[in-house]
Image: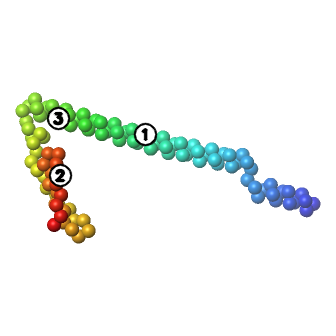
């Protein structure tokens, strides 16, 4: 009788192998779904960046056709930031940005 009870206790204390396999399969499926979501997100971000570049090119073409140079020669822009108590001033003119510490 004791032997039978010990065997029964061992069987109930250890999860069946099929349950462990099912749990591992669930984890693998969840990881695969997460990876697919991340890849889809990256593809969408790249697609959006490409569309923005196309729109900028189209706007440049429209400006050239209309004789407008507003987007071609926007004046310098200045920004001021405070980082760790230091004031930083940045000035952008065209594609050049200069930063100065105060």
**C-alpha separation, residue under disc 3 versus residue under disc 2:** 23 Å
Disc 1 crowd rating (10 Å Cα; few below 14, some 14-19, many 20+) is: few
Label 2 vs label 1, nearer the camera: 2
The disc placed on residue 59 is 3
**Residue sticking out furthest to the right:** 1
Task: Residue at 10%, 32% (x, y): give it.
Answer: 64
User: Could you tell me which quadrant the N terminus lies in?
Assistant: bottom right
Task: Tell me the number on the disc at residue 97.
Answer: 2
Tell me the residue at 26%/38% (across/down): 52
Instruction: State left or right for residue 92 relative to residue 21.
Output: left
Task: Name the residue that disc number 1 marks.
Answer: 40
Position of 82 with respect to 2 (left or right) is left
Q: Mark on residue 13?
A: none
Label 2: state its secondary structure: strand
Residue at 17% in and 35% down = 59
Q: Secondary structure at mark 3?
A: helix
The relative height of residue 93 versus residue 80 in the rendered view (above or below) is above
Residue sitting nearer the eye, 40 or 83: 83
**Residue drawn where x is 57% and y is 43% of the image:** 29
Above or below, 64 against 11 in this view is above
Q: Position of residue 30 (x, y in %)?
A: 55, 46
Q: Quadrant of residue 91?
A: bottom left
Give the image location of residue 49, x and y in percent: 30, 39
Q: Which mark's residue is nearer the viewer, 3 or 2?
A: 2
Counting residues from the N terminus, which is met first, the one under dot 2 or under dot 1?
A: 1
- Image spot of residue 98 (x, y percent): 16, 54
Q: Nearer the viewer, residue 77 or 52?
A: 77
Q: Quadrant of the C terminus?
A: bottom left
Q: Residue extending furthest left?
A: 67
């Amino acid at each position: 009788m004791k032997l039978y009870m010990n065997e029964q206790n061992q069987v109930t204390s250890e999860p069946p192998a099929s349950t462990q396999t099912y749990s591992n399969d669930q984890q693998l499926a969840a990881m695969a779904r997460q990876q697919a979501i991340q890849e889809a997100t990256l593809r969408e971000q790249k697609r959006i960046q490409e569309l923005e570049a196309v729109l900028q090119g189209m706007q440049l073409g429209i400006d050239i056709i209309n004789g407008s140079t507003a987007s071609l020669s926007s004046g310098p822009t200045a920004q001021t930031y405070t980082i760790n108590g230091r004031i930083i001033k940045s000035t952008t003119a065209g594609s050049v940005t200069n930063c100065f510490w105060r």
